[in-house]
Amino acid sequence: DGGITQSPKYLFRKEGQNVTLSCEQNLNHDAMYWYRQDPGQGLRLIYYSQIVNDFQKGDIAEGYSVSREKKESFPLTVTSAQKNPTAFYLCASSLSGGRKAFFGQGTRLTVV
Amino acid sequence: GDSVTQMEGPVTLSEEAFLTINCTYTATGYPSLFWYVQYPGEGLQLLLKATKADDKGSNKGFEATYRKETTSFHLEKGSVQVSDSAVYFCALSGEYKLSFGAGTTVTVRA
């Protein structure tokens, strides 16, 4: 089945640690996105990528990093510089930028 | 820049009631418009879309019409069920990405 897969579903991080969230798609989509969702705040764009080996900062990129070495994969690293990382993280992909997006099931990150 | 404004929630309804969630947008050009739905603990699913003015998107009893003159894309359903309880997001397509509204939480009581 075609789709977009995020892992893990739940992730716990100690303060000061970097963690990497996985996002893989087999839809042959060029564009991929990372969003952060906090209670009552909707979706905020962290990073997006229109094509392999290229990515752009979104609205809240500070404390995060990404790579796009393969078309299918767009991992997100939450670094220790991110002061409030506890949130629900959503990955999405689309055929090209601005087209309808397909979402993964999300990763809930909690700092302990 | 592009932006989407949704009516604030939460919205609580009884089963079989009529649901409307208002959505207005600001954009350059002629964006496509979308409604997404999110069930608890899950990602977003595309509910319906419209790609040009006067288009009506529909799915699962939900409808929304692309109104260019009022820059709106209001979501409606004539008779809601308990299973419609979810968070609903309005979104528009930009050149490189989608812009989302803040989301409206809908709870339907039996």
Image (cartoon, coloured by chain):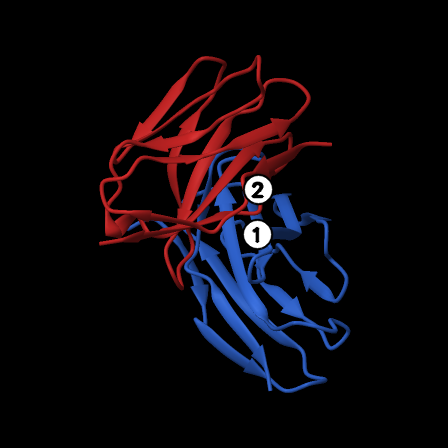
Q: Which residue is mark 2?
A: B101
- Chain of the residue where label 2 is placed in the rendered structure: B
Q: Where residue A12 sits in the image (x, y, percent)?
A: 54, 82
Q: Where residue B79 sits in the image (x, y, percent)?
A: 24, 36
Residue displayed at 49% across by 16% down: B52
Q: Secondary structure at mark 2?
A: loop
Question: Which amino acid type is marked by label 1?
Answer: Gly
Asked if the residues shown at circle 2 and circle 1 are in contact, with their CB atoms under 8 angstroms apart, the answer is yes
Residue displayed at 58% across by 49% down: A33
Asked whether, in this view, residue B93 is left or right of residue B12, the answer is right
Q: Secondary structure at mark 1?
A: loop
Quarter-wise, where is residue A34 in the image?
Answer: bottom right
- Chain of the residue where label 1 is placed in the rendered structure: A
Residue density around tag 2, few if under 14, some if 14–19, many if 20 or more, within 10 Å: many
Q: Is residue B10 above or below residue A109?
A: above
Q: Colour of chain A?
A: blue
Quadrant assignment for the C terminus of chain B? bottom left
Question: B66 or A110: which is nearer to us?
Answer: B66
Task: Calculate the distance from the C-alpha at mark 2 to the C-alpha at mark 1.
Answer: 7 Å
Residue displayed at 58% across by 51% down: A43
Quadrant assignment for the N terminus of chain B? top right
Q: Which mark is residue A42?
A: 1
Asked whether, in this view, residue B10 is left or right of residue B108, the answer is right
Q: Colour of chain B?
A: red
Residue density around tag 1, few if under 14, some if 14–19, many if 20 or more, within 10 Å: some
Question: Which amino acid type is marked by label 2?
Answer: Gly
Q: Where residue B95 sits in the image (x, y, percent)?
A: 64, 30
Q: Which mark is residue A92?
A: none
Question: A1 or A10: which is nearer to us?
Answer: A10
